Image (cartoon, rainbow, N blue to C red):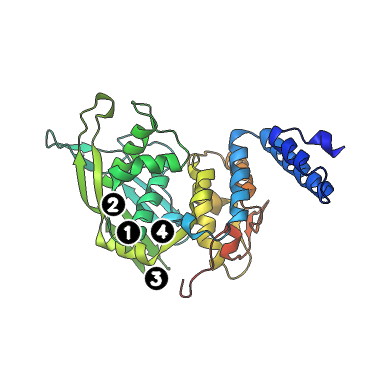
C-alpha cells in the first residue's frame, strides 16, 4: 500500500535501494511521509508554500545566529506608512501607547543642477526591509557608514525579489524608498502623563548622492549613507534581533512585517497575559482601513499567516481584541536573550 503512495522518482529509487534490507519497512514509512509533505506543499499557494518552508527551516535551525538581522526597537513599535502618500503630504505620525514616531519627508540635492529635489514619505514593505538592511549592516560592521551600492542588489535577491530594471522594476522601487529614507527626518516622542521627551533628527548625517547615466536608472541614488551618531548610538543599544528567514516570508506585506517586529519586541517584555483592544490594534496596525470591521477581518487574515510561520505564538483573537501572553525568544526562533537586554 505504501509503495503506491511513493511516486516521485528520487524517492522510488531510495525505496528500491533498501528493499532487501532489515530496515525496509521503516524506510518505506519515512519515504511515504516525505511524499505526503511534498504533496502538501504542491497544493499550497505560492505564499503559503513559502511560509511553510520557512516554518520548517526555522524549526530545523532555531538559534542560527548567521541568520540574525537587526532593526531599531523604536521602529518595531511605531511603523512607517503602509501605502504611498501624495508628494504634497510631508508628515506622518504613528502613536503606540505612550510612544510616537513622526516622519517628515525631505529633499536630496541633484548633483547635476545643484537643486534640492523633494522626496516622498517612505512607505510599504520595501522601506521596512531597507531599514532592517541598513540597521543590520551598521551593527555587523560596528560602524555608522554603509556602502549601499555594493550591497543592494544582493539584498534584494536575498529577500526573494527578482532584480529588474526600468521604471517599474524592483531596483527603481527599492531606490525610491532608500532615497525617501535618506532624506527624511524622524522624531521619536515618549511621555508618562507628567513628563515628555522627544528626539528629533535626521537618521543619516551624510548622504553621498550620484546620478547614473543609464536612461532607465536616471534617478538620484545614495551610494553611501552614514547614520547620525545619535541614531547610531541608540541603535547600538536598542537593536532588536530578527530572523532573516522569517522576514523573507513576510517581505511582500508591510503589516505582517510590523506584526513580526512587534511580537519580537513585546512578547518577552510582558509580565503577565494582557489583552489589546481592537481600538489599540487599529492604532498600531490599522493603516489605511476606514472601517473597524474591515480591519478586524484583514488583521485576522494577516495574523493567521504569521501563525503559519510561528504556530506557537501565545496569541488569541476574541471579541475584546488580541490576548497575548509572555513568551521567550525561542517562540520566534531566536537565541536566548543576553543578560541586561
The residues tagged by marks 2 and 1 sit, at their Cα atoms, a distance apart of 8 Å
Q: Residue at x 30, y 60 (%)?
A: 231
**Secondary structure found at label 1:** helix
Q: Residues within 10 Å of mark 3 (few under 14, many from 20)?
A: few
Residue located 78% across and 44% down the image: 18
Tell me which label, 4 or 1, sits earlier in the chain.
Answer: 4
Ranked by sequence position, the earlier of labels 2 and 1 is 1
What residue is shown at x 39% (from left), y 63% (from top)? Answer: 190
Task: Determine which of the numbered discs, if any, sits on residue 146 in the image.
Answer: 2
Q: Distance between the residues labelled 2 and 4?
A: 20 Å
Q: Mark 4 points at which residue?
A: 74
Task: Please name the residue that numbered disc 3 is placed on.
Answer: 194
237 shown above or below 224: below
The location of residue 240, given as percent across then percent down, is: 45, 60
Residue receiving disc 1: 141
| Residue 293 position within the rendered picture, expressed as x and y whole percent measured from the top left | 61, 41
**Cα–Cα gap, marks 1 and 3:** 39 Å
Amino acid at each position: 500500500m505504501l509503495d503506491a503512495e511513493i511516486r516521485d522518482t528520487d524517492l522510488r529509487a531510495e525505496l528500491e535501494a533498501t528493499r532487501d534490507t532489515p530496515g525496509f519497512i521503516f524506510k518505506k514509512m519515512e519515504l511515504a511521509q516525505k511524499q505526503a509533505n511534498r504533496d502538501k506543499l504542491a497544493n499550497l499557494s505560492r505564499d503559503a508554500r513559502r511560509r511553510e518552508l520557512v516554518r520548517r527551516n526555522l524549526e530545523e535551525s532555531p538559534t542560527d545566529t548567521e541568520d540574525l538581522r537587526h532593526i531599531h526597537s523604536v521602529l518595531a513599535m511605531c511603523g512607517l506608512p503602509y501605502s504611498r502618500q501624495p508628494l504634497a503630504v510631508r508628515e506622518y505620525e504613528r502613536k503606540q501607547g505612550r510612544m510616537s514616531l513622526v516622519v517628515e519627508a525631505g529633499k536630496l540635492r541633484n548633483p547635476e543642477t545643484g537643486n534640492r529635489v523633494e522626496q516622498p514619505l517612505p512607505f510599504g514593505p520595501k522601506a521596512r526591509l531597507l531599514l532592517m538592511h541598513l540597521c543590520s549592516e551598521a551593527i555587523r560592521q560596528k560602524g555608522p557608514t554603509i556602502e549601499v551600492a555594493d550591497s543592494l542588489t544582493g539584498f534584494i535577491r536575498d529577500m526573494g525579489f527578482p532584480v529588474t530594471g526600468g521604471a517599474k522594476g524592483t531596483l527603481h522601487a527599492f531606490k525610491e524608498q532608500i532615497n525617501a529614507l535618506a532624506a527624511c527626518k524622524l522624531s521619536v516622542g515618549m511621555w508618562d502623563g507628567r513628563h515628555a521627551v522627544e528626539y528629533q533628527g535626521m537618521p543619516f548625517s551624510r548622504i553621498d548622492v550620484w546620478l547614473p547615466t543609464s536612461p532607465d536608472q536616471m534617478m538620484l541614488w545614495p551610494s553611501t549613507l552614514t547614520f547620525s551618531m545619535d541614531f547610531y548610538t541608540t541603535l547600538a543599544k536598542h537593536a532588536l534581533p530578527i530572523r532573516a528567514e522569517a522576514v523573507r516570508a513576510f517581505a511582500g506585506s508591510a503589516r505582517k512585517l510590523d506584526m513580526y517586529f512587534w511580537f519580537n519586541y513585546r512578547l518577552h517584555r510582558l509580565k503577565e497575559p494582557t489583552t489589546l483592544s481592537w481600538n489599540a490594534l487599529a492604532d498600531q496596525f490599522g493603516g489605511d482601513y476606514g472601517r473597524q470591521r474591515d480591519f478586524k477581518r484583514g488583521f485576522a487574515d494577516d495574523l493567521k499567516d504569521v501563525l503559519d510561520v510561528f504556530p506557537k505564538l501565545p496569541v488569541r483573537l476574541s471579541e475584546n481584541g488580541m490576548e497575548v501572553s509572555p513568551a521567550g525568544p525561542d517562540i520566534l526562533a531566536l537565541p536566548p536573550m543576553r543578560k541586561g537586554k
